[in-house]
Image (cartoon, grey):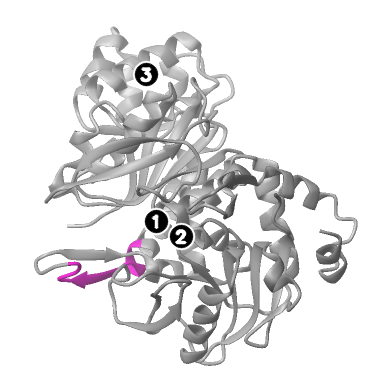
């Protein structure tokens, strides 16, 4: 999810342009200017730092760019590269966020050869033993999703049940458990999905989610993306819109993100 | 309902009505004759869900609790929110082979057969004060096993807390000598 909502002071036309460019070029925009009277790129340059990912701040570059003609063309150039935008205020809060992420990552325990030889298991139970780290985890999700018109948080059994409800409560949403077969007592719809060896089934209660609702899907970890895809399919079958999938941990080598297709994925920690 | 309210100091608490009504009864699940108390509908009612968590948090916030243990899987839906609000750890108590690290196990008796509950070694430290959460207590078999696990880890179980409590247990109000705190009775 691009941070367009944070730039609510921008003219709608500029917001739309930026949103389109971001989407087309798959740029991450961390934040937009919160400058009160921002109505043009020239105003923005006083409040934005242009920073290439993993490189030192190049604030001032954007100012130079904005003073030149054809800002649209230059903006396109910016979007072609891997720049991300941060306001001054958000640079400071980004450090705080990085610190929280570092703490969270440090509390996750790695267990080799579970559930079988060759698998490196990412154990979040140790994160849950650290009240600050657990709170930071929930806060990071809540900060992202609060006020975004999400009415359903769907959590995948069983570790999604640990993270989903606190988020749902904080953002004012319902919590819907997505469960293994024969656990939900009422009428269900079922979706089959593939495992590495064999198949599994995921179920959701009929009537839990209404058509048109905006849904966030939560699990502790995304590996191949099979469970998340099954959850997305169940929710779409009842006419809901999945706005994003969120996990504490991603295993990027397993390319679960690609399997989600056009559904965005937000994670806190990448595990090799 | 009145008995619980009086005992738990919740008499007149208007939130309990909403919580009770938000729970759906599903007849003959998982087997004929059982009136299943389905809390998933409570989770769909944001106010009722929030009230449920708030009532538990109000009770445990000043009791110096450092561990909230939740029984898989529906205990996971209530326990973490309570733990976060009172600044305690959350410890999942799970079916066999789910927890990846070294575990201790406790067998317990079902109506037909035996089941097993596990907890990670090192999740609790000796002397910690713990509460155990599950959505519902029926015979108390699962919660008894949970109490034993926490005590084997050296923790002191202060109370067991459930959203729904069945009549057989209601009269006792204690489990292995531990107090029970239950919000509502099952409905028919």
Q: Rate crowding at label 3 as few (under 14), some (14 to 19) or many (20 or more) other CA atoms within 10 Å.
A: some
Of the residues tagged 3 and 1, which is closer to the observer? 1
Asked if the residues shown at circle 2 and circle 1 are in contact, with their CB atoms under 8 angstroms apart, the answer is: yes
In this rendering, the answer to whether A65 lies above or below A115 is above
| Image spot of residue A128 (x, y percent) | 45, 67
**Does residue A107 appear to the left or right of B148 in the view shown?**
left
Give me the residue at 22% from left, 40% from top: A193
- Residue that protrudes farthest toward the front in the picture: B32
Question: Is residue A119 visible in this depiction of the protein?
Answer: yes
Give the label on residue A237, or none: none
Quadrant in the picture for the N terminus of chain A:
top left
Give the label on residue B73, or none: 2
Instruction: Give the camera-side residue of B178 and A151.
Output: B178
Instruction: Count the numbered circles shown.
Output: 3
| Image spot of residue B32 (x, y percent) | 52, 52
Give me the residue at 36% from left, 18% from top: A18
Which of the two discs, 3 and 1, labels the residue nearer the N terminus? Answer: 3
Label 2 and label 1: CA atoms lie apart by 6 Å
Instruction: Give the camera-side residue of B170 and A210.
Output: B170
Of the residues tagged 3 and 2, which is closer to the observer? 2
Give the label on residue A19, or none: 3
Residue marked by disc 1? A158
Label 3 and label 1: CA atoms lie apart by 36 Å
Secondary element under disc 3, as helix, strand or loop, is helix
Segment tinted magenta in the rendering: A105-115
């Amino acid at each position: 999810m691009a941070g367009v909502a944070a730039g609510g002071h921008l003219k709608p036309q500029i917001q739309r342009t930026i949103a389109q460019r971001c989407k087309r070029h798959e740029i991450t925009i961390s934040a937009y200017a919160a400058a009160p009277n921002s109505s043009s790129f020239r105003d923005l340059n006083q409040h934005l730092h242009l920073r290439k990912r993993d490189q030192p701040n190049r604030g001032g570059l954007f100012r130079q760019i904005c003073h030149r003609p054809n800002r649209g063309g230059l903006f396109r150039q910016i979007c072609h590269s891997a720049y991300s935008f941060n306001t001054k205020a958000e640079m400071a809060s980004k450090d705080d966020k990085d610190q929280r992420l570092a703490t969270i990552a440090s509390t996750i325990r790695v267990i080799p050869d579970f559930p079988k030889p060759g698998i490196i298991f990412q154990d979040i139970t140790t994160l849950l033993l650290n009240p600050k780290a657990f709170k930071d985890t929930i806060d990071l999700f809540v900060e992202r999703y609060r006020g975004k018109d999400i009415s359903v948080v769907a959590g995948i059994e069983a570790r999604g049940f640990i993270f989903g409800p606190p988020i749902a409560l904080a953002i004012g949403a319902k919590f819907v458990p997505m469960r293994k077969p024969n656990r939900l007592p009422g009428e269900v719809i079922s979706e089959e999905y593939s495992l590495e060896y064999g198949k599994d089934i995921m179920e959701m209660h009929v009537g839990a989610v209404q058509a048109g609702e905006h849904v966030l899907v939560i699990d502790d970890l995304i590996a191949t993306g099979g469970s998340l895809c099954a959850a997305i399919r169940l929710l779409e079958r009842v006419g809901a819109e999945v706005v994003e999938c969120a996990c504490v941990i991603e295993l990027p080598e397993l390319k679960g993100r690609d399997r989600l297709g056009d559904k965005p994925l937000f994670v806190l920690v990448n595990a090799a | 309902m009145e008995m619980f309210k009086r005992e738990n100091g919740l008499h007149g608490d208007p939130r309990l009505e909403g919580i009770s009504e938000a729970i759906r009864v599903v007849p003959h699940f998982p087997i004929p004759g059982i009136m299943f108390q389905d809390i998933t509908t409570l989770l769909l009612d944001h106010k009722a869900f929030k009230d449920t968590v708030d009532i538990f948090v109000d009770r445990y916030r000043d009791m110096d609790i450092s561990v909230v243990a939740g029984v898989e899987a529906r205990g996971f839906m209530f326990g973490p929110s309570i733990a976060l609000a009172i600044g305690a750890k959350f410890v999942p108590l799970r079916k066999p082979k789910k927890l990846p690290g070294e575990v201790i196990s406790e067998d317990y008796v079902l109506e037909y057969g035996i089941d097993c509950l596990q907890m990670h070694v090192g999740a609790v430290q000796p002397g910690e004060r713990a509460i155990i959460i599950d959505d519902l207590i029926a015979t108390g078999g699962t919660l008894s096993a949970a109490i034993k696990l926490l005590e084997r880890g050296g923790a002191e179980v202060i109370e067991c807390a459930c959203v729904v409590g069945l009549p057989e247990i209601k009269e006792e109000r204690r489990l292995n000598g531990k107090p029970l705190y239950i919000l509502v009775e099952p409905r028919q």
